[in-house]
Image: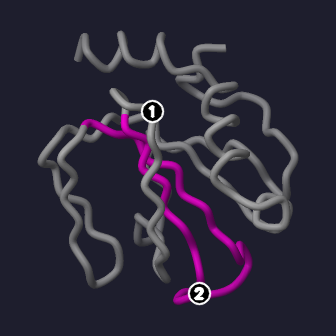
Amino acid sequence: MPFLSHFLMQISKSQILDVIHQSLSTEQIETSFIFWDCEVRNKGEQIQIGPQTYQFDYDNILIFVDLAPFFNWAHPCLYLFFDIDTQCVEKIDASFPPYSRHFPETYSIVLKYGIEQIGMSGSGD
């Protein structure tokens, strides 16, 4: 997995926070739990979001925004897919999380109600 290690050295926690602040409103940030999945999704890889399957034509990382953290599913949430090469963000509105019961090991919580969380794994900072 040398590419992943190389990637994580290039993308820092502060860069992920910049992506979040540029992509979301202050209200969304202050009312959400926001997660960073440090696993790189390769071009062509598919991801299941609720009943829909998405496939991207670029290498990306996922930032998941739970807009109502203590509600049962289905409720509004957002997916931000960060294009590693272009640094662009694709935002997808959804109603289901990217996991069923337990957070994947690659997920780290970045912000809770707008407050930065300590101890993000794979952060590079």
Q: Which residue is mark 1?
A: 87
Q: Which element is circle 2 on?
A: loop
Q: What is the CA distance from the residue labelled 2 to the residue labelled 1? A: 28 Å
Residue 30 at x, y = what percent?
A: 85, 61
- Residue 1 quadrant: top left
Q: Is residue 18 above or below residue 80?
A: above
Outermost left residue = 44
| Colour pattern of the rendering | one colour
| Residue 125 vs residue 17, the one in the foreground | 17
**Residue 95 falls inside the magenta stretch:** no
Q: Residue at x 25, y 60 (%)?
A: 47
User: In percent of the image, x 42 and y 50: which residue is there?
Assistant: 81
- The image position of residue 112, as x and y in percent, is 80, 54
In screen coordinates, is 101 left or right of 55? right
Q: Please state the horizontal and vertical placement of residue 125, each as a whole percent of the image.
A: 67, 14
Amino acid type for the residue under numbered disc 1: Gln
Quarter residue 43 falls in: top left
Q: What amino acid is labelled 2 in the image?
A: His
Residue span colored magenta: 59-83
Q: Secondary structure at mark 1?
A: loop
Is residue 123 toward the left or the right of residue 69 in the image? Answer: left
Which mark identifies residue 75? Answer: 2
Q: Where residue 66 appears, x then y in whole percent? A: 63, 68
Q: Residue at x 61, y 34 (%)?
A: 16
Task: Determine crowd level at label 1: few under 14, some 14-19, many 20+ residues with C-alpha closer than 10 A.
Answer: few
